[in-house]
Image: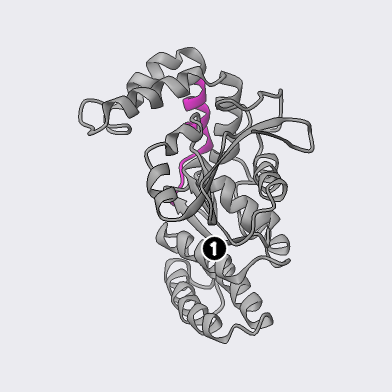
Amino acid sequence: MLLETPDSTRLAVDVWGTGRPVVLVHAWGLSSHMWNAQLPAFVDAGLQVITLDQRGHGRSERPAGGYDLDTMAADLITVLDELDVRDAAVVGQSMGGTVVAHAVGGIGSERVTDVVLSAPITPCLTVGDDNQLGLPAEAFAANRAALVADIGAWLTANSVGYWGVGDDRFPHDTAWTLRSIYETPLPVLLATNAAVHDSGEAVRMAESANRLAKGTNPAVLDVLAMAYASDGRMDIAARTAQLALQRALASRNDKLAAEIRDRLTHYQEAAAQASPGSVDAP
């Protein structure tokens, strides 16, 4: 089916099975077909599986713009709303994980109760005061220049060790991955690459704290905090956990609040050791 976004872009969406909804959001340069091998297991488990091709990818329309995180995240919220999805688990892979985090943590949706971020690009890959493990923006600009110069050569150079060419169990999947990226319009690849790699809107929790505090499920915020912590972003994990704790207390979920409080203490202590004085002690 095709669902229309507020800017009149039609997104290709598939719904498989019945039961509790699981929404799968694909990676950069790919499409919903990347989840093909997982579909039977989810459906056999009694779940309803919803997949979408993000704008500019796969079977969805390719508008001239809208490849920023705000718009891509809003696209996901549109799909949830149009299908009247409730109690959903939303799974995002790589760029899809960033879109999911921005949609749930930034925009917010009561339709989502669980989040899975698989190899996510969060909160941002560019080096900064709050992201010492990142790379300089010039590195990402050079990467995009290489894409423009010769995308075929770029794919070849990045295949070994990344997609496992010559050393993978599923060579047909690898070939499909390379072909899908090659067939995605370069303007789409460049714009989405910039959005998730070196944009200031790439899910920086300090900048979206007000939106995060409005109605977001505390369990989802707790998952986001754990994702940041696992990636070494303890200061952002602490801020996100603080918001999760506030929401849990407001909803009188004492059990979840106690669990979040324990994790928050760990995040704050780790952040203080990494950067003394950056995060207040509990």
Tell me which corner region of the image, top left, top right, bottom left or bottom right, holds residue 73.
top right
Residue 258 sits above or below residue 267 on the image: below
Tell me which corner region of the image, top left, top right, bottom left or bottom right, holds residue 171.
top left
Q: Is residue 37 left or right of residue 148?
A: left
Quadrant that contains the C terminus: bottom right
Magenta extent: 133-145
**Which residue is at 50% across, 18% downward?**
183
Q: How is the image coloured?
A: one colour
Camera-side residue: 139 or 147?
147
Camera-side residue: 107 or 173?
173
Q: Where residue 119 appears, x then y in whole percent?
A: 42, 47
Residue 180 sits above or below residue 89 on the image: above
**Magenta-drawn stretch contains 40:** no
Q: Mark yes or no: residue 146 visible.
A: no
Q: Is residue 38 left or right of residue 98?
A: left
Q: Where residue 85 appears, x then y in whole percent?
A: 65, 54
Residue 21 sits above or below residue 78 on the image: below
Q: Where residue 166 appears, x then y in whole percent?
A: 21, 25
Quadrant that contains the N terminus: top right
Q: Amino acid at mark 1?
A: Ile
Q: Mark yes or no: residue 87 visible.
A: yes
Q: Is residue 124 left or right of residue 173?
A: right
Residue 33 sits above or below residue 101 on the image: above
Disc 1 secondary structure class: helix
**Magenta-drawn stretch contains 136:** yes
**Which residue is at 46% across, 65% downward?**
226
**Which residue is at 58% across, 68% downward?**
239
Residue that carries the numbered disc 1 in the rendered image: 236
Q: Residues within 10 Å of mark 1 (few under 14, many from 20)?
A: many
Q: Main secondary structure of the magenta part?
A: helix
Q: Where residue 162 appears, x then y in whole percent?
A: 32, 33
